Structures are given as C-alpha cells and as structure tokens.
C-alpha cells in the first residue's frame, strides 16, 4: 500500500511538506536528478515513485543488486523514447564504478533524470561525478507518531488489512517504538499480527509481544547506521560520557559485532586514554581477550567493564597526535641515519661507535641528525591530571634541559659512574 502522490507520503516535511523541495519541484514542473539517502524503511523508493507520478512523466525502476549492464542499457533506450523520463535506481550504492559511469552522459545531457535510493552515505559510496550531478536529499527516520499514522492507514485501507483485526492504541504505540523509525518493519509486524490472530480479534501489547520484543536496530554491518554507532562509541568514551558509551556499546552488542567492538575499543584506548592511564589500556586488551574467550552473550560483561573504565579514565592524545605529526614529517623529510646509529657501521672508529656498554651515556647522545636536532615531535599534555603522565612529562623536561651531543669520543672520555 504505497502512497500514489507526494502529499500522501508520511513525514519528511522538508521534502514533501507545503514548502518542501520536492513539492516545489513538482509545482514548477521542474524535475531534477537526486540521491535520496537514509535508513531502511523510511520511504526513499516510495518518495521517488510518488515524485515521478506527480511529475506525470515516464519512469523506469531498476534494482542495483539484480541489474546488469544489458538491463541498464535497455532502461536507458526506453527512456530515450520519451521527451522526459526518470530512472529510479534502488540501492544505487551497489552499482560498481563502471555501471555508475554508464549513467553519467545520459544524466548530463538530460536524456533522463536519475533518482537513486541508498542507505549509505553518498559521499562515501557514490562516484563524485554522480554526486555532482544530483541533489543529495536526506530521508530521515520516521517518528513514533508518524509510524502510528502509517499503521492506522494500513489497518483501515481496503488495499491494506481492511480492519481484519483491531489493534489497540497501546499496541500501535508498541509497534512504533520497536520499529526504530522503519515503517516497513512496523507494517511487517502488523501483517504478522493479522496472520497470527483470528479476524476481528482485539490485539494489544500482550498479544504483540508474542510476535516481537526486540527493537529494530539498523545494525546491519553494511549499513551507515552501523558505522555511525561505532563512531559514536569512540566519541562518547573520548567525551567521558559513560552513559552514552554504554548505550552505543549495547547497540553493537545487540548486533553481536565483536570484531568492530574490538577494533574500536583498542584504538580508543591507545588514542584517547593513552599515556594518561596505560593500565586501563592494558586492561582493555585483557577485557577483549576475555570477551573473545567467552563469546556472546557473556562477552558483554568484560566489554561493559572496559567501556566504563575507559570513559571515566583521564584522557591524553599526546602519544597519538605525536606519532601522526611525526609520520607526516617523515614522509616529507627523508634522511640518512648517522653512522653511529647504524646496525652495522662501516669504517667507523671504535671511539665513534655506539656505546652499548655505557648506559650512563645513552640519555646524552644525540639521535636526530644535526638539521633536525631542534625538532620536537612529542608534545606533552601539559594539562594532564594523570600522576603517571605528569611523571613522564617531568622526565621529558629533565632530558631537554640536559641536552644531547653527537660527539661520542668526548662523551666516552667521561668516566662511567660507579
């Protein structure tokens, strides 16, 4: 039971409301190419079809998962027969570069208008050339009230369930809460209820719980929401918001995506906690090992433990930022290692060789070449409240004050401290 026109579409006011972009486009009879992106079940394809019907021009619909070049070429040839045409490509992010490139010249010369629908970030999944020729329009998850409107329509419509069951207000709200903004999920659950319960039955929360209790989380590993949750987990830990960090961890645990959790927590521990609390970094590794050993569902216990500790721990990005900056410099300024630092130095006098037997000299030796000796790649976290990191900072400042030398013969003349 799809809307026939844009004014029947639920929600998406910024697109199909009275002042919405698509509404204005239809009113002016000015079709545009566009990419509709957003979570599953939010109506992207429905909006595309309604837009094409409102424009009253021919449209073809293809699915990027099942289409091939021959099918696409056929759709393009059909579009050429009409003055104006629209080609709707569902799951457009599934088209490889060659197939995306096939569309380009025809979109560019106006043979047809392209409407792509995708659940992924178009800036990541689509060619720049395609993006530059299309308006990027976000289709947002529906609110619970909007989901309820869609469910009521389905219950009452002759093309829907035609009042075969009577779902209570609380029951509709229950479905809407579980749906996570996905109207397709909500309608499927309503249809399951119509199949499971006899005609005319009164269906409430108790009955619906026998069908589904788990919220519909958009956590498919290929979906944008999954990557957003992984990103939000690290940002919440970095921001010391333990409640948010636990929530995003829980979302990933519901999806049982231990691989993503492991990678993100390890990176977070080393990058954001780092020198401020190395013990927490080590315990993070231990918690991950424990989670791997016990597996889900028990894995959530060590994972929850380390997320709480990391979020509440003092933070320091000093080490992570220092190596990033140094990597950038190393790529731009290559140099030869000094002779006394080489693994097997050739034609070097004994007094100029590295003193393996003189640990008292190691802190006094200059390890950078002369043209870099004043460079400071490590930037201490001067604001650190970690006692451990403060000790490291003091040690670093002490060695800076003492200075270093590349005159090994002179250094070696000083007697070894007893």
Image (cartoon, rainbow, N blue to C red):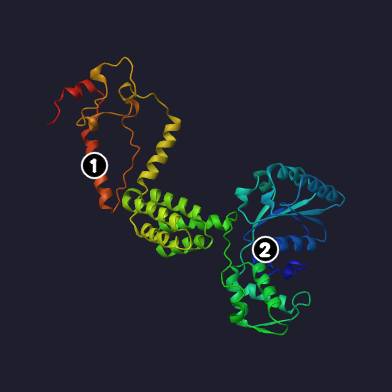
Taking depth in this image into account, of 175 and 28 the one nearest to the observer is: 175
Question: Residue extending furthest top?
Answer: 347
Question: Is label 1 or label 2 in front?
Answer: 1
Question: Residue extending furthest front?
Answer: 293
Q: Is residue 3 at least partly visible in the picture? A: yes
Quadrant of res 314: bottom left
Q: Is residue 241 at least partly visible in the picture? A: no
Q: Which residue is mark 1?
A: 395
Please give the label number shown on residue 23: none
Is residue 406 left or right of 337 when viewed as pictured? left
Q: Which residue is mark 2?
A: 15
Q: Are marks 1 and 2 in contact (CB under 8 Å)?
A: no
Q: Residues within 10 Å of mark 2 (few under 14, many from 20)?
A: many
Coordinates of residue 373 in the picture (x, y in percent): 31, 29
How much space separates mark 1 and mark 2, taking CA atoms? 60 Å
Coordinates of residue 296 in the picture (x, y in percent): 48, 61
Taking depth in this image into account, of 64 and 395 the one nearest to the observer is: 64
SS state under label 2: helix
Taking depth in this image into account, of 292 and 228 the one nearest to the observer is: 292
Is residue 92 left or right of 84 when viewed as pictured? left
């Amino acid at each position: 039971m799809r809307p026939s026109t844009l004014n029947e579409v639920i929600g998406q006011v910024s697109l199909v409301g009275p002042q919405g972009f698509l509404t204005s486009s239809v009113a002016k009879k000015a079709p545009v190419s566009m990419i509709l992106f957003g979570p599953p079940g939010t109506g992207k394809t429905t909006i595309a079809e309604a837009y094409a019907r409102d424009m009253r021009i021919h449209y073809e619909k293809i699915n990027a998962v099942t289409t091939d070049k021959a099918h696409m070429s056929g759709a393009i040839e059909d579009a050429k027969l009409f003055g104006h045409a629209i080609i709707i490509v569902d799951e457009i992010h599934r088209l490889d570069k060659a197939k995306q490139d096939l569309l380009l010249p025809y979109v560019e010369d106006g043979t047809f208008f392209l409407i792509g629908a995708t659940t992924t970030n178009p800036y990541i999944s689509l060619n720049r050339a395609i993006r530059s020729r299309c308006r990027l329009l976000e289709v947002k998850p529906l609110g619970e009230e909007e989901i309820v409107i869609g469910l009521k329509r389905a219950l009452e419509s002759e093309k829907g369930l035609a009042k075969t069951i009577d779902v209570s207000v609380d029951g509709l709200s229950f479905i809407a809460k579980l749906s996570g903004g996905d109207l397709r999920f909500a309608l499927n659950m309503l249809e399951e209820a119509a199949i499971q319960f006899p005609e005319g039955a009164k269906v409430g929360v108790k009955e619906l719980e026998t069908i589904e209790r788990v919220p519909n989380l958009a956590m498919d590993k290929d979906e944008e929401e999954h990557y957003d949750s992984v990103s939000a987990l690290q940002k919440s830990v970095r921001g010391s918001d333990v409640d948010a960090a636990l929530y995003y961890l829980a979302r990933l645990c519901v999806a049982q995506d231990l691989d993503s959790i492991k990678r993100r927590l390890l990176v977070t521990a080393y990058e954001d906690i780092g020198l401020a609390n190395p013990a927490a970094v080590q315990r993070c590794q231990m918690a991950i090992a424990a989670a791997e050993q016990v597996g889900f569902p028990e894995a959530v216990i060590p994972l929850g433990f380390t997320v709480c500790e990391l979020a509440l721990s003092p933070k320091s990005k000093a080490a992570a930022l220092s190596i990033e900056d140094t990597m950038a410099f190393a790529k731009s300024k290559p140099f030869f290692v000094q002779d006394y630092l080489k693994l097997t130095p050739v034609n070097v006098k004994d007094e100029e060789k590295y003193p393996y037997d003189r640990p008292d000299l190691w802190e006094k030796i200059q390890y950078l070449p002369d043209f870099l000796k004043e460079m400071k790649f490590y930037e201490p976290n001067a604001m650190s409240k970690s006692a451990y990191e403060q000790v490291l900072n003091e040690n670093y400042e002490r060695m800076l004050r003492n200075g270093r030398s590349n005159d090994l013969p002179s250094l070696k003349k000083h007697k070894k401290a007893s």
